[in-house]
Image (cartoon, rainbow, N blue to C red):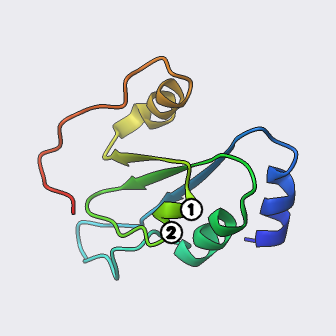
Amino acid sequence: DNVDLAVAAMERADVAIVCGATTAAESEDRPSLLLDQSGFIGEVLARATIPTVLVAMTPGAVLLPFAANATAIVHTFLAGQETGHAIADVLLGRENPSGKLPVTIP
């Protein structure tokens, strides 16, 4: 998790995708509503000089204090075994990123 290396890699791209998730289990509560590695993700987004998409994969509500630094945000919610394909379809414009959730997310 080296911010300098991540930012250097982004400089060679037209658009960057930064992925973040939360670790969760049925047997315990999440320690916070932040993404795992939130500090790293926030720093990378703050230093981005190109359009940057944040893909957040969480089982529920999440806080994104760095949201203003992302060009766009895709938030997946329990996407299942086709998560990778679903995210790729949305990012490539093959699918409309809309849906209905069984919960309210602040």
Q: Amino acid at mark 1?
A: Asn
Q: Secondary structure at mark 1?
A: helix
On the rendered structure, is 13 left or right of 25? Answer: right
Q: Amino acid at mark 2?
A: Phe
The crowd level at tag 1 (other Cα within 10 Å; few <14, some 14-19, many 20+) is some
Residue drawn at point x = 88 percent, y = 45 percent = 12
Quarter location, residue 104: bottom left
> Residue 105: where, in percent of width, then height?
21, 58
On the rendered structure, is 46 left or right of 96? Answer: right
The residue where tag 2 is placed is: 66
Residue drawn at point x = 51 percent, y = 21 percent = 93
> Residue 21: where, in percent of width, then height?
46, 60
The residue where tag 1 is placed is: 69
Q: Residue furthest top?
A: 94
Marks 2/1: CA–CA distance: 6 Å
Q: Residue furthest bottom?
A: 31
